[in-house]
Image (cartoon, coloured by chain):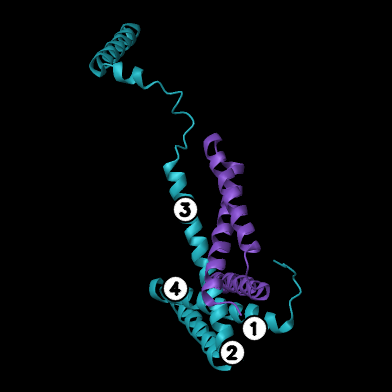
Chain colours: A purple, B cyan
Amino acid sequence: MAETSDIAISMLMVGASLSMLLMGLLISYYGSSKTRNVGLIFLIVGAALIYYVTTMAYDTVVFMNSILAFVGGMIGGIVGIIIFLIAIIKS
Amino acid sequence: MDMSTDFSNEMLMDYFVSMFVVGVGVALIATGLFTSYFGAGKSQKIGFGLLFLGIAIIAFFMVGYPLEEDTLIEALVSGLAALAGMILGMFIILFVLMKVDTVDDLEDLDLEDLEDLDLDEELKKLEKELNAESNDSAEEEE
């Protein structure tokens, strides 16, 4: 059974790597010649973080559960905002 | 790490669905609070409705949803930690982008030319040109 601190640290790294990968992709595609290099660096850092999280000694089942919980919370938040928008638009 | 995606129903119900319900509830409470405070008339009523719906969902989750305390803590910690990680990543990105010189055209701009400019002389030249143009147009009218 993994410790709560293991879950928190690994998911912190997953979140940071996700934002770095997505923003790095955007910046390296749409950025100017100078920001493009920064975007590529973000992509490399994000990929390295993901690689580190997936290779570190850690309970696989707990990690996948944590990912499921994170995805569920994100989708739930999006659905909540969609419900709010529908209620406002339909009124 | 074995990244197999063979999820059991128990895992889905314990982690995905529970956090989905919490996410919907929190989003409804947040948007309901916002709309009921800043809204007026009909939209304020909708805000109160959303707020009570959100509170009802969270209350159902706390009272009626079959979930062990350890599982709930794990799920909440993972969701919050991932959110905090995303915010941290965005801060790092913004910090680095603000520190990096992002304008391409600054190299082409010759700042020495701007320093040598005498603004008074330029103003006098412009005034002379304008006066000459107005004189020409007055002669043409005559």
**Mark found first going from the N terminus, 3 or 2:** 2
Q: Identify the chain of the residue marked 1, using the numbered disc in the image.
A: B
Residue sitting at x 46%, y 23%: B108
Residue B67, horizontal then vertical, whole percent: 60, 89
Q: Which residue is mark 4?
A: B35
Give amino acid for label 1: Asp
Q: Which residue is mark 2?
A: B68
Residue A41, horizontal then vertical, whole percent: 56, 45
Using the rendered image, report if marks 3 and 1 lie on a common chain: yes
Of badges 4 and 2, nearer the viewer stands 2
Q: What kind of element bears circle 4?
A: helix
Eyeballing the image, is A63 above or below B22?
above
* On-image quarter of the C terminus of chain A: bottom right
Residue B95, horizontal then vertical, whole percent: 43, 49
Give amino acid for label 3: Ile
Give amino acid for label 2: Glu
Mark 4 to mark 1 CA distance (whole Å): 32 Å
